[in-house]
Image (cartoon, helix red, strand yellow):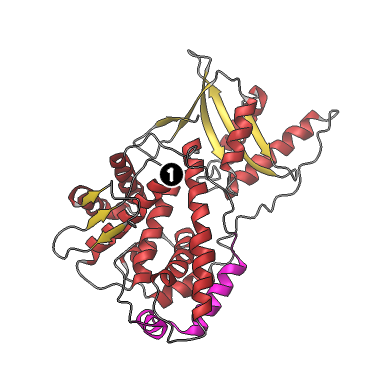
Amino acid sequence: MSASVRKQYCLKDWLALHGLSVIKVRDFLFHQQANSVVGNVKVDDKQACLTLTANDGWELAAEALSLKFPMLKREIDTVKKGCEVNFYASKKDPPYTLDRGDDFPYVSVCYRGYTSDLICIAHEFGHAVQLFLSAGKFLPPVLRELAAFISELALIECLRDLNSEMTAYLVASWSQENKVYLTDNVRKLELVLKDEKSPYDYCWNYPIARYCAIALSDSLPVVQLEEVFRGLWSVEKCVNAACDKKDVLAMRNYLPEVPALDKEKPALNAYRSLGMMALLDIDYWQGESEKRIEDYYAGLLGHLQKRSSMIAINDVKKPIGYVAWEIDSDKPEVINLTRQAAPFGDHLEVLKKLKQRLPDDAVVISKHMRSSRKEQSVW
């Protein structure tokens, strides 16, 4: 959350500040809601408790944003080290980032060790970096929240190919927050669009910013996304670009149902499994589709032959993800996950099915080569 605008402002002022109109906002919300699937995963905070300290979370947020924008690594590191941060604010106080002019921003959050708190740290870190980059230039609130939401998505992208249970809960927590940003806040904004004299409410900024962040993070080249993060694009330009990206928010599983196994044709079953894994990889963010086809095929076939892979099927018999692994030659109880893909957001379900498949005493390790945290226990 950034500093709020004075309460005497109204909808007409907010629209003018952002270069928008009632019709533009209404059409944008309609377009995005038509293509949106709001997360409906309920997260139990007791299960989503992390072992990360608040400082770990701050470091991770910086690492994720540096991976997203490597050209800004120096500035991101400067903000990481220079900001004054209060990680233990009262639970009653909303998190915020304060612009202190020539000094580094001041950040205040209440960190209790939950996945939602980690997302909050990434959000405020995004605010802090954008404030530092803007060097005192005024940015309208939608652009400020847009940068913060991009920072959240950078954190998820950084951890997504890790797919540990912590990461799955992180994605679930983020999806759960969509109910506030993309349902409750949207309704509030839609109600006031009928009267341009409606008193200003900061929550109007969130739906526009969040929809744009999701769409543009997925579709823009990194150079252009960096411009958005810096606040160099107008809100109108961001909105137009987000509308050009159709169905970007939808995570619908378009794959067909899995046919029943044919006991008399094991080769056919194997080819179907290869096909399912290939389709899942094509849609996954950190896909394997960049490999040479012969190497890719040989790798998957090897896992099928060794029975060291699992395709997860949901209740309507559609593939939702797959996992491949190697058994440690020195420690047979240690299983190293070499590949995980869940392109439709079913990370928790895939992990549950994997846990049912493996021995109870198995030590399952996931490798994350893009991060300084190379390995992490899955459960």
The reply to whether the magenta stretch includes residue 58 is: no
The kind of secondary structure element at disc 1 is helix
Looking at the rendered structure, the number of numbered marks drawn on it comes to 1
The quadrant of the picture occupied by the N terminus is bottom left
Residue 50 or 18: which is nearer the viewer? 50
Residue beneath disc 1 = 115
Q: Which residues are magenta?
A: 9-37
Residue 298 visible from this viewpoint: no
Residue 101 rendering spot, x and y as whole percentages = 16, 65
Residue 343 visible from this viewpoint: yes
Residue sitting at x 42%, y 61%: 221
Residue 93 rendering spot, x and y as whole percentages = 32, 56
Main secondary structure type of the part rendered in magenta: helix
Residue 299 or 284: which is nearer the viewer? 284
Residue sitting at x 38%, y 79%: 18
Q: Is residue 274 above or below residue 23?
A: above
The reply to whether the magenta stretch includes residue 33 is: yes
In this view, the residue farthest toward the right is: 264
Residue 290 or 366: which is nearer the viewer? 366
Image quadrant assignment for residue 238: bottom left
- The residue carrying pointer 1 sits among few (fewer than 14), some (14 to 19) or many (20 or more) residues within 10 Å by Cα, namely many
In this view, the residue farthest toward the front is: 92
Q: Is residue 216 left or right of residue 262?
A: left
Q: Is residue 207 above or below residue 39?
A: below
Q: Is residue 142 above or below residue 173?
A: below
Residue sitting at x 33%, y 48%: 110
Q: Is residue 278 left or right of residue 340?
A: right
Image quadrant assignment for residue 111: top left
Residue 66 rendering spot, x and y as whole percentages = 32, 49
Q: What is the three-letter code of the residue carrying label 1? A: Thr
